[in-house]
Image (spheres, rainbow, N blue to C red):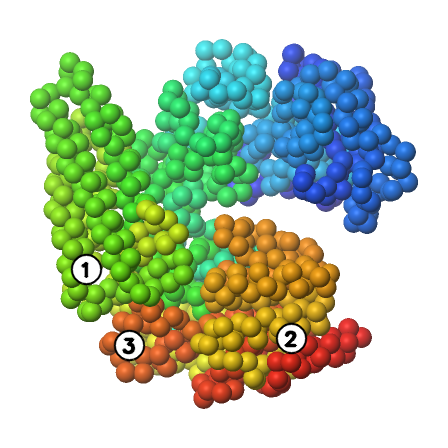
Amino acid sequence: MAFHDAATAVDEALLPATPGFVAESYRTLAERAKTMQFGLIEEYVVILDTETTGLSVQEHELIEISAAVLSGNEIVERFDTFVHPTTLIPDEITKLTGITQADVAHAPSAREAVAQLAEFVGGRPVVAHNATFDRSFIEAVKGGVGVSDIWIDSLALSRVALPRLASHKLSFIAEVFGCAAVSHRAIDDVDALAGVWRILLTALSDLPGGLLRLLADTHPDVPWAYRPIFSYLAQAHVGESFSLAEQRDRVLNEVIHEERVDADDFPVLDLPTNQEIVASFGADGLVSRMYPEYETRSEQVEMACEVRDALATSTHRAIEAGTGVGKSIAYLVPFAAAARRNHITMGIATKSNNLADQLMFHELPRLANALEGGLSYCALKGFDHYPCLRKMERLLRSNSEIETKKDPADTLTALAVLYAYVCQSPDGDLDALGIKWKSVNRADLTTGSRECARRLCPFFPHRCLVHGARRRAAQADIVVTNHSLLFRNVAAEGKILPPIRHWVIDEAHAIEREARRQWAISITADDSRALFERLGDSSTGVLGGLVREGATAEATTLYQGLVARAVSTVNGASASMAELFTAVRDVAGRAKTGGYDQMTIWIGPELRQSAEWDILALSGNAAIDALEQADKALVSLVETFGADMPDQMVEVADPARRLHDLLDGLKLIIQGEDEHYVYALQVNRRLRAGGEALTAERIDIGEVLATDWLPDIHTAIFASATMSVSGGFEHFEHAIGLDRLPSGSSRSLHLESSYDFDANMAVVVASDLPDPRNRAAYLSSLEDLLVDIHVAMGGSVLTLFTNRRDMEDLYASVQPRLAAAGLELACQQRMSSTRRLRDHFIAERTSSLFALKAFWEGFDASGETLRCVVIPKLPFASPTDPLACERALREDRAWARYALPDAVLEVKQAAGRLIRSSTDTGVLVLADSRLVSKGYGKKFLNSLPTASYQRIEAGRIGRYLELWRKAHDRH
């Protein structure tokens, strides 16, 4: 990163939309830091950095420790030593740090080096960037705990001091402010951090003085390493008060509001011609300015023109674009042109965070830079992605105990980061602020749509970051959001998102399932218990607080009576709901089928006519009666005292709304009269109590979209690599409602992949395995086949299962056999981290993995990391699945119309994990003989990206893979 001068360096390092007064203070930091005096907090602190053989304190070791004593702006004493590890230094660590085996050969052991460090530090405060990392490695060595009791994480502190920086990496901060360079050697990084430390202290002193005092004094019972720093700096601002509302006003004063036009006001859009779109993808065109190495792809240009034509005719498109087409640029170019030319907002909805991040941090910035006049864009997320200023104020100024199962100091650090951020930022969300959510209770700092106090909140609407995000989105050219928020907006009748009439729904293969999830009505034991705990009783929760308010002399008899009535009825409703969930578990206990761990039972006609249901319905109706009484009591309380006691009633209003929703949902499910829904109950068999649920899901998602959403949308572009089944789009069009629209309203098309699947991908069908429905025989044969596949491929195999029981049974038998062959196999066990499994699989080239649903789609592992995908069993929905049962009851041939195409699309998604770049090669092994023994097998095989497949006996597949591997390893 090269900068022209100091001021330019800072400007280029700031987040977009940084207020001018904030930018100016950052520009002068380096110069002011040279002369600032910080007294005790900069006297004899120790700056420390380490180098290690890897990132895991359990698996890796120290190889270098460097430290320096800082007094003022000078280093007065140094400590530096290599450390002799018990294992060899990995090659990649030597390349990164330059530390070789020869360097550490005669170095002290970790224990000796840490003892020397402890003597050097002498218990003084230690400052380290990402101090948790360095501290964990130091304290993992015997005697390391005694190095220091005070560790200050300059990474966390930099997020408080410099919230508008685009990055808080040590190397980035050091370069921006002209400190010593970072080199991945501990001794150099200590010099860099010594300079950065004074920058951070200077920046912290720029925070509002009253805020510094509040941070220093908040929750004094919690030990917090940063408290002395804030306390010292606050001494320069004695008597200053702090108003978050005033700070928000100051930040927002510089925001220019640019009103957009509702596209409904345009009968016809002003758009580039098809020739202009084609030119954008040509030599010296727009896309070439974005990506200098860009080569034109005919499929990408065709898609861009198709999107442009859809915009011009106010029609919809379903576009299946194979891997490598570059579909995001194909739709961004015409969408950006339409937004700019017509002064309207266009929307993009994605399923995954990966794609949203790719758009927000890579493609949209490049497009904005390449377009004359630029392009405005923003991400819009759900309520709980934004800080709630009202809750922040309450937590900062409260004396009550912080709710957390871990270190409460992490909550105070999160508060400090958030306050600094909202005092310098007109908008933004929580996701990039580095908050340790495993320690911090997110609900203490965020709000939900129904929980939001709105007009009762002093920050509503303009000062609020949640509502400000919606306002900002309405002023942007391009808004990026996710499927879940899009469908919640449909359910909320458009009250969440701005009025956007043109959408791209990327990763559209997943939208029917996501819409069904978002629109589901679910009554769970866990949610019910949490609601009643939040409401509380005469001594706890929200109601307990109201009872204490009623103990004052000023409380009226009416108030005391209404509170008492609320406590009584809420307690009764809580008890009735507990009895209902006991009845749910009793019904599940008598069922013969329904699942392995999580039992799901269809509430169909047969169950509703049973004696078991009569008992459950009796409990359900009793709960409905109790909830109605509690609902009336809470509504009466809020309506009577809302004006006189707004702060207290805000706390009651949200759980009261949730209780009302609970009542409505329970009525719907117990009565079961609305034929738009399929009803079910769930019980976790692994728990004696808890995990029970009653659910209602919309059956026909396409009907809702065709009635409640698509008529308000001028153009919707549905894009995915997997939409068609045997070349047809009928299943997808029905799922999303396109087939319910007037003729000519939409068009569907397939664009071939830019990759050569026929050359790079082999498909093998195991033709003679037993039918999977004969479980014992099938698993025995599959075990041998899986061993053969892994040995032949030398690892790098991903096996995708449809159920946990088969996966765990096979893992228990296959893993020891592979270990004996020197091959590593991991398994997606209960409670295991999907991210850690993914990262390990990608990092270890020859590792293999048994996995479930989370890995069927959205998992990218290009190159040699993944060379073979195995699908043991076709992913048909369970015959006891409530939706499948309900459809079978209502329609002839429901299995062929729904379950079969859904399974075909899932196999296409899984196959897509294999080839993620033009140079990838791999084998897809389909270990379900029904592909060749049943007529429907052709639908699967004809839908794959390669037209050819090999039908091979299971015992010969290993040999085939060995030959395939040799042939492709030569290239």
Q: Are the residues at dot 3 and dot 2 in contact (C-beta closer than 8 Å)? A: no
Spatial CA distance of label 3 from label 2 is 36 Å
- Name the N-terminal-most of marks 3 and 2: 3
Q: Can you give x and y, in whole percent of width and height, for residue 162 in the image? A: 58, 32
Q: Are the residues at dot 2 and dot 1 in contact (C-beta closer than 8 Å)? A: no
Mark 3 closeness class: few <14, some 14–19, many ≥20 residues within 10 Å: some
Label 3 sits on a secondary structure element that is helix
Label 2 sits on a secondary structure element that is strand
- Name the N-terminal-most of marks 1 and 3: 1
Rendered residue at 26%/79% (across/down): 891
Amino acid bearing label 1: Glu
| Quarter of the view holding residue 616 | bottom left
Residue for badge 1? 612
Amino acid bearing label 3: Ala
Visible residue check, residue 296: no
Rendered residue at 60%/37% (across/down): 165
Residue for badge 3? 888
Q: Can you give x and y, in whole percent of width and height, for residue 799 in the image? A: 58, 67
